[in-house]
Amino acid sequence: MSSNFVFLAMLFHVCWVVLLYVALTVLRAPKAWGVDTKSGVIGRYSAYEPKVSANLSNQFEWPLLFYACCILILNMGVTDSYQNILVGVFIFGRVIHSFVHIFTNNIRLRGAVFTVNFLAAFLMWVRLAFIFP
């Protein structure tokens, strides 16, 4: 169960990134391909394009260390309930971070959510260091 949870959490994050790419593609479509120029339905949401783009970029920064730790955890077979909780907190935090980043301008809240993500991944590494054979 433990290693399945870690793998499924990683897979969920990959799917989340794909969803952000789809959103970014749809938001860029009016300018890039000249679609929706008459109705302007998609164009009304153009203010979200830089936020989605920036959030997508964020998905390749700190999560890189999360993935590295997860791969080590799975390879070494050292999953436990602490790691699973931290993995869950990190993934849930990434989704919350995306919503806060894209739909609000609340920098303090975004920073607080990022701090939770940061600590979850960091504590995964600390836990791994203590149980390293």
Image (spheres, grey):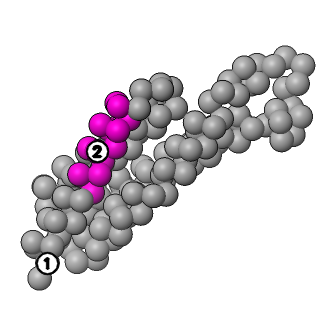
Which quadrant of the figure contains the N terminus?
A: bottom left
Q: Quadrant of residue 80?
A: bottom left
Q: Nearer the viewer, residue 69 or 14?
A: 69
Q: 48 or 25: nearer the eye?
A: 48
- Amino acid type of the residue tagged 2 in the rendering: Thr
Q: Which residues fall within the magenta stretch?
A: 108-121
Q: Main secondary structure of the magenta part?
A: helix
- In this picture, is 108 found above or below 25? above
Give the number of the disc on residue 110: none
Give me the disc on residue 115. Answer: 2
C-alpha gap between disc 1 and disc 2: 25 Å
Work out whether 87 lies above or below 43. below
Q: Is residue 82 left or right of residue 51?
A: left
- The picture places residue 17, in percent across and down from the top left corner, at 52, 49
**Local SS, label 1:** loop
Residue 15 in view = no
The residue positioned 29% from the left and 51% from the top of the image is: 118
Mark 1 highlights which residue?
132
Query: Where in the figure is residue 15, as x and y percent of width and height?
Result: 50, 49
Question: Residue 82 placed where, x, y %?
Answer: 13, 55
Residue drawn 28% across the image and 45% down it: 115
How many neighbours does mark 2 have within 10 angstroms: few (below 14), some (14-19), or many (20 or more)? few
